[in-house]
Image (cartoon, helix red, strand yellow):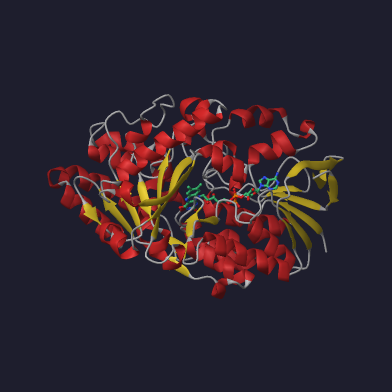
């Protein structure tokens, strides 16, 4: 039995904690916040439930396998999401990638030839994605792991060819090959997913978005709570409101942590939170970090943060449903002048697209009787307006209000008179996300998705090892593009390291 400390109770920390406790190790999870969940959490205000940020996840085969391995799958009501896409030229709720193509073709009849070429390239990417109904190989061990890697090994030559062609090409460069910059189709194909992510991911993203997009009926917080409860039953100790301020090392190895002036010893420490802070802030001995890594770390680009508006509405689910049709709607309408890299554009929020999501349409319990809940989200430029007012609380409040109003205005396109129905209103900015999860700049999914700003050489690798012996990374930051699948893969690999 080993004594293991996990820093952070996001999905990565909770999965690692459960798997390790189940194997008989003594595990303590330290969580800075008063509730478990990290980015997969939620909260109630005035009787309305909102997801903190993460609305859904993909890679369900892996997530479901993990929940079955832990033994909680039957306790969680996972529901598949459908996404409606709306723009000036189309409006549809595709069930799969083929239906998505039809919607786009119908919306842009005169662009058929160009669309044929674009989709034939995306088709190739999708064909090579492998069987998405199978869990990631990382989740297996021994022969089963080898078996599940076989399809990837066999398709490796084709993968490499496609990767050479599209792995370093950004979605903007891909879109610009076919469509005039600024046109709606340029915006559609370049604006998919994270800004300037590798074109190679566009295929995977598009096919997963319509067929493998899931949420939890009782909310993300219920998922985290179930995992936390199970961890407790297995003998694990979850310490909430317990921020770890130091990772303690001895002779180059992690031997414990310090929290609220107490020292806790461990054979292993798993950092299941932010990567940069693990090394630049928490590690007690900076000399353990090789100079090259230290140089790289501070400036390494992280994924963009989100702004989320939380609205409680004096409107029934039924009425909201007449406008929304399904709980999740993406509006594509980047207006002229939209530039995700312009941090000083005060009008950014009136130019960006917003997505709408109603937790109460997923589960009516998420709002008081006769009312509904709605979330609006958009990706925002890094450090918008001098990082949201340069530390001045009053300016921060004004900027947040301005962002909220612009996003509500955009959403009014789908829900006329939205403003009049608002019963509760608040918002989270990247600063809020950083405050609650300690993720640098509110990075929403680990490192930058831009292939020119890679932190890891291989974007699909899972890197749990660190220069410090017995210190592992058990969060989404172990993978370039993070996400729930990244955190999951990291958790499994950490567990394998602890014998
Ligand atoms: C708006 C938004 C939308 C998203 N959409 C998707 C999506 O559709 N699909 C998808 O796969 N992913 C999505 N993601 C990303 C995904 O949610 C995260 O990548 C994943 O949940 C991260 O899990 P994690 O366990 O690695 O870390 P986190 O969830 O970041 O958890 C880290 C935890 O560690 C704690 N912590 C950190 N430092 C300390 C410390 N020193 N002491 C104690 N505790 C500490 C934090 O408080 C936090 O609870 C989204 C994220 C956001 C913000």
Which residue is drawn at the image coordinates 42% and 24% (left, top)? Answer: 344
The quarter of the picture where residue 127 lies is bottom left
Place of residue 107 in the rendered image (x, y in percent of width and height, measured from the top left): 17, 49
**What percent of the width, then of the height, locates residue 383?**
50, 29
Residue 125 vertical placement versus 293 (above, below): below
Horizontal arrangement in the rendering, residue 109 relative to residue 70 (left or right): left
**Which quarter of the figure has residue 225?**
bottom right
Q: Is residue 95 left or right of residue 294?
A: left
Which image quarter holds the N terminus? bottom right
The answer to whether residue 426 is visible is yes
The quarter of the rendered structure image containing the C terminus is bottom right
- At which x and y percent is residue 131? 44, 63
Q: Residue furthest right?
A: 251
Q: Residue furthest bottom?
A: 74
Indicate the position of residue 403 as horizontal and vertical percent values. Answer: 41, 36
**Which residue shows up at 13% across the image and 47% down it?**
109
- At horizontal 34% and vertical 63% (from top left) the residue drawn is 317
- In this view, which residue lies farthest toward the left? 110
């Amino acid at each position: 039995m080993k004594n293991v400390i996990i820093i952070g109770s996001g999905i990565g920390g909770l999965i690692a904690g459960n798997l390790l406790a189940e194997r008989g190790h003594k595990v303590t999870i330290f969580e800075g916040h008063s509730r478990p969940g990290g980015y997969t959490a939620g909260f109630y205000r005035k009787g309305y439930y909102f997801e903190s940020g993460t609305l859904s996840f993909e890679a369900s085969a892996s997530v479901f396998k993990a929940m079955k391995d832990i033994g909680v799958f039957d306790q969680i009501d996972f529901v598949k999401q459908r996404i409606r896409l709306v723009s000036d030229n189309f409006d549809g709720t595709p069930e799969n990638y083929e239906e998505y193509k039809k919607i786009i073709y119908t919306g842009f009849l005169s662009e058929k030839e160009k669309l044929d070429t674009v989709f034939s390239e995306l088709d190739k990417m999708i064909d090579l994605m492998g069987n998405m109904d199978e869990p990631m190989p990382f989740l297996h061990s021994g022969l089963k792991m080898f078996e599940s890697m076989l399809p990837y090994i066999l398709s490796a030559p084709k993968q490499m060819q496609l990767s050479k062609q599209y792995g370093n090409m950004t979605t903007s460069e891909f879109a610009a090959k076919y469509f005039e910059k600024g046109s709606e189709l340029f915006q559609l194909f370049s604006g998919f997913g994270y800004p300037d992510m590798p074109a190679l991911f566009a295929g995977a993203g598009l096919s997963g978005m319509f067929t493998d997009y899931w949420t939890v009926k009782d909310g993300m917080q219920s998922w985290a709570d179930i995992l936390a409860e199970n961890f407790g039953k297995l003998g694990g100790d979850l310490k909430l409101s317990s921020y770890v301020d130091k990772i303690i090392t001895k002779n180059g190895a992690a031997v414990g942590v310090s929290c609220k002036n107490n020292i806790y010893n461990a054979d292993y420490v798993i950092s299941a939170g932010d990567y940069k802070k693990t090394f630049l802030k928490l590690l007690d001995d900076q000399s353990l970090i090789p100079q090259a890594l230290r140089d790289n770390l501070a400036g390494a680009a992280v994924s963009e943060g989100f702004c989320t508006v939380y609205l409680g509405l004096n409107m029934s689910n039924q009425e909201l449903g007449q406008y929304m049709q399904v709980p999740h709607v993406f509006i594509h309408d980047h207006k002229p002048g939209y530039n995700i890299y312009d941090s000083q554009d005060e009008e950014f929020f009136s130019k960006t697209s917003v997505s709408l999501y109603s937790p109460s349409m997923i589960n009516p319990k998420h709002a008081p009787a006769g009312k509904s809940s709605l979330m609006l989200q958009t990706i925002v430029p890094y450090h918008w307006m001098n990082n949201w007012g340069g530390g001045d609380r009053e300016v921060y409040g004004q900027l947040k209000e301005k962002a909220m109003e612009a996003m509500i205005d955009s959403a009014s396109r789908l829900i006329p008179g939205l403003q009049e129905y608002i019963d509760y209103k608040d918002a989270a900015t990247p600063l809020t996300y950083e405050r609650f999860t300690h993720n640098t700049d509110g990075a929403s999914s680990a490192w930058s998705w831009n292939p020119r700003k890679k932190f890891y050489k291989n974007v699909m690798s899972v890197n749990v090892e660190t220069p410090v012996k017995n210190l592992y990374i058990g969060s989404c930051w172990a993978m370039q593009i993070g996400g729930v699948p990244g955190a999951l893969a990291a958790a499994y690999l950490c567990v394998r390291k602890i014998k």
